[in-house]
Amino acid sequence: MAPSSIPNDIYQYSLRSAYNAGLKEGGPPVAFLTNHGTHGVGIFEAEEDDDGNEQSPNDMIQVDSVAYVIDSNGTATKADKNDQMPFTMVTVFQPVQRVKPPSGTTLKRVKELFEGRSKNTPLSFRVQGSFKYINTQQQTYWDVKGTIFGFGIPAWQKEVSGDGLVSCFLSDDKKKGGRVVDFETGDGAMVDFSKCGRFHLGFPQDEEYEQLRL
């Protein structure tokens, strides 16, 4: 069955624990995303500066089948189709539930909402609209409009996919974003989400992966 006919399945490459253990090279290119999902998040290979020092890896957010690179300053640009990601998660996002949260809703409150609906099953989610602030690993944005997309990860899946809500932000003008740490919604924000029916995990095939102690 083609991935396009299996909405809300999650396709993941590699393990979060493997990435944390140092497997930060290779992985599928951006072109892979459009074959397996419309929305997603990931981490690009780290690049070296002119002195040969490894730079902070850039984040990836895919929204409406377009992938964006978010650099360490929070600047967002369209990703090159050949850019590789040693860790990524994507899905054909077709939300089946919608909640209009009150103004001032935080990441913690959204996490509690998901745990009440889907405690043991991963889900994909989108928060769209205005935000009083969004704190990302790159920058803190105040009074901004845009889209947060990501995945709610149950506790048992932490070493596989990450901890809690794994998500990135992209502004409406597609020029800035970051890996989300916390947020507070403004007026009119909307939360869409859907539970995952099937989870597909691709493993790295190189010797370096097999040498890791996971």
Image (tube, rainbow, N blue to C red):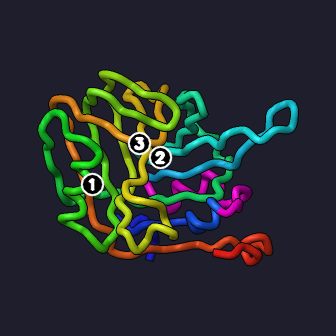
Residue 187 image position (x, y, % from top left): 16, 29
Residue located 30% across and 22% down the image: 143
Calculate the distance from the C-alpha at mark 3 to the C-alpha at mark 2. 18 Å
Residue located 39% across and 69% down the image: 9
Tag 3 residue: 181
Q: Of label 3 and label 2, which has the lower sequence position?
A: 2
Q: How many marks?
A: 3
Q: Nearer the viewer, mark 3 or mark 2?
A: 3
Whether residue 182 appears in magenta in the rendering, the answer is no
Calculate the distance from the C-alpha at mark 2 to the C-alpha at mark 1. 21 Å
**From what the image shows, is residue 18 above or below residue 150?**
below
Depth check, front residue: 75 or 17: 17
Question: For numbered disc 2, what is the local secondary structure?
Answer: strand
Image quadrant of residue 23?
bottom right
Residue located 24% across and 68% down the image: 118
CA neighbours of label 3 inside 10 A, class few (<14), some (14 to 19), many (20+): some
**From what the image shows, is residue 171 above or below residue 83?**
above
Cβ atoms at labels 3 and 1 below 8 Å apart: no
Q: Is residue 188 left or right of residue 182?
A: left
Q: In this view of the protein, can residue 7 be seen by the observer?
A: no
